[in-house]
Amino acid sequence: MSENRTAMLTKLADLDAEQAKAVNAGGTYMERHHRRGKLLARERIELLLDEGAPFLELMTLAGWGSSFPVGGSTVTGIGVVSGVECMIVAHDPTVKGGTINPVSMRKTGRAMQIAEENHLPVITLVESGGADLPHQKDIFIPAGRGFRDLTRASARKQPTIALVFGNSTAGGAYIPGMSDYIVMVDKGAKVFLGGPPLVKMATGEVSDDEELGGAEMHATTSGLADFLAVDERDAIRIGRRIVARLNVTKRGVTAPRQAREASYAEPLLDPEGLLDVIPTDLKEPFDPREVILRMVDGPSEGNEVAFDEFKPLYGPSLVTGWARIHGRPVGILANAQGILFSKEAQKATQFIQLANASDTPLLFLHNTTGYMVGKEYEQGGIIKHGAMMVNAVSNSTVPSISILIGASYGAGNYGMNGRAYDPRFLFTWPNAKSAVMGPQQLAGVMDIVARAAAASKGIAFDEEAGAATRQFVEQMIEEQSLPYFLSGMVYDDGVIDPRDTRTILGICLSVIENQPIEGNLNFGVFRM
């Protein structure tokens, strides 16, 4: 077994352990939930999906490293329901009653953004006690945006469905209230703005759960419920029936594209080999073609080469070219030697323009330390050339996907379409790192600045204190560069096993086709 494979397998074992924290976040409450005859959030999702359909869970590690449970008391992801790709948001009632905290808000906000950009129906599996009140100051305003997102989705003819299994109280009552379709479980769902204790305190009125907000009352009296389910499985059955009648069509699929997708070859190189390709030290270069050929379709009729490289002799530290993944065309930009020079930036700019001209989605594979610095490169125009690349990325309108397969530092992260540039999806491999710059470089810059400050004041630089500061800064930046930290901040859509990348890309490229794929050639002013 290679050293690279051993190191990656160790990271993947660690990733499994971290993701298990989200799956088991409910602890002993999970068994209590079962004893009440109720399904867990992921069990509800499994029953909702078509038989054998995959579920692309997103942002599993949201909240990692914070004071909140990993996963943010919600499960989000994309799955096929009655033949339709849907965004699914499921409250986890075993984690503090499914209450909404700041992590939950960031996670569901990102899920709604993905649903909007890809015109996905949204199915919310509701069982939530509303706001986590001790943190109300951090969620009050974002929660209002969540309600707004639901109503705007409806206005876009992007269907929203709420399956209510349990409590949906206070602000949580507006989740079903603002959905297009509402299914409530009899004797289970409880939807009210204020529960019996609050009502009694506020008005003196005495009432019980059922007459105040029970499913039968809402189905027969208030009219809030469109369907009354006999139990949780019946609610899921009704939800599937609703989706089947939505008359959803993919807006980005053309006849030629469908023909290409009908038949494709598996990759030339085995995806299993990805574990051997990536070095343990991110400073060690590797050939991104070894990665690309393990992701993209192999040669087949109508697809003569697996990867049709563009400008292979120009700007060699950025590899660009055309390929197909599960029959779907894609343009790929992949960092080779880590550093982006002027030629690489110019090459990327032209390639992004060409992808927009041909309405072809883009895939960015990050392994960059950023744009080259130094007198020679500044005089050669690295700023204006880097700005051209960032301009092209910023104004490109074809859907894009970014995957951090190695380093992603500084403005290189921006030029390679990092999270700030709104790629449709962004995933991270467990070996990747991302920050303003590497830990040693950042600590070194701070050390130089501190020495210069001491010299300007005419005082001696404290070497011992300086060494301690460098060590502290390096450790802090190293920790904040790790994929779990970034995922915990919801700066990616998930940390993934490299071997799953092709499958995940296939799902994402299919999801993207729910919207028209239209490029843009209006890029504003390029500083030449």
Image (cartoon, rainbow, N blue to C red):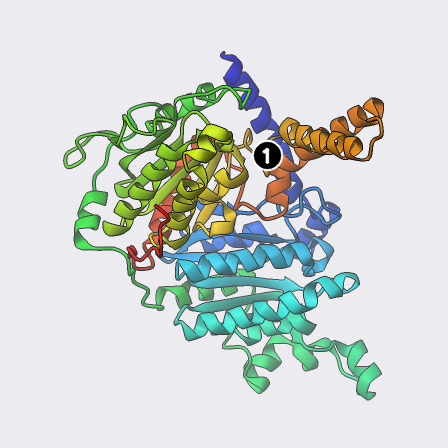
13 horizontally vs 115: left or right: right
Instruction: Count every numbered label the image shows and give the total.
Output: 1
Q: Position of residue 408 (x, y in %)?
A: 52, 35
- Toward which corner of the image does residue 209 lie, by quadrant? bottom right
Residue sitting at x 76%, y 61%: 135
**Could you say which is closer to the camera, residue 431 or residue 333?**
333
Q: Position of residue 525 (x, y in %)?
A: 36, 55
15 horizontally vs 206: left or right: left
Question: Where is 87 relative to 413, above or below?
Answer: below
**Which residue lies most toward the left here?**
301
Q: What's under tag 1, amino acid-wise?
A: Met
Tell me if residue 423 can be seen.
Answer: yes
**Could you say which is closer to the camera, residue 15 or residue 344?**
344
Residue ID for mark 1: 437
Tell me if residue 53 can be seen.
Answer: no
**Which residue lies most toward the top here?**
1
Question: Where is 253 relative to 382, above or below?
Answer: below
Q: Position of residue 237 (x, y in %)?
A: 46, 62
Q: Position of residue 124 (x, y in %)?
A: 53, 63
Quarter placement of the C terminus = top left
- Toward which corner of the image does residue 487 lie, by quadrant? top right
- Toward which corner of the image does residue 444 lie, by quadrant? top right
Mark 1 secondary-structure assignment: loop
384 horizontally vs 136: left or right: left
Residue sitting at x 55%, y 80%: 224
Binning the other alpha carbons within 10 Å of mark 1 as few (below 14), some (14 to 19) or many (20 upward) gives: many
Question: Where is 372 relative to 66, above or below?
Answer: above
Question: Where is 303 relative to 180, above or below?
Answer: above
**Could you say which is closer to the camera, residue 517 or residue 69?**
517
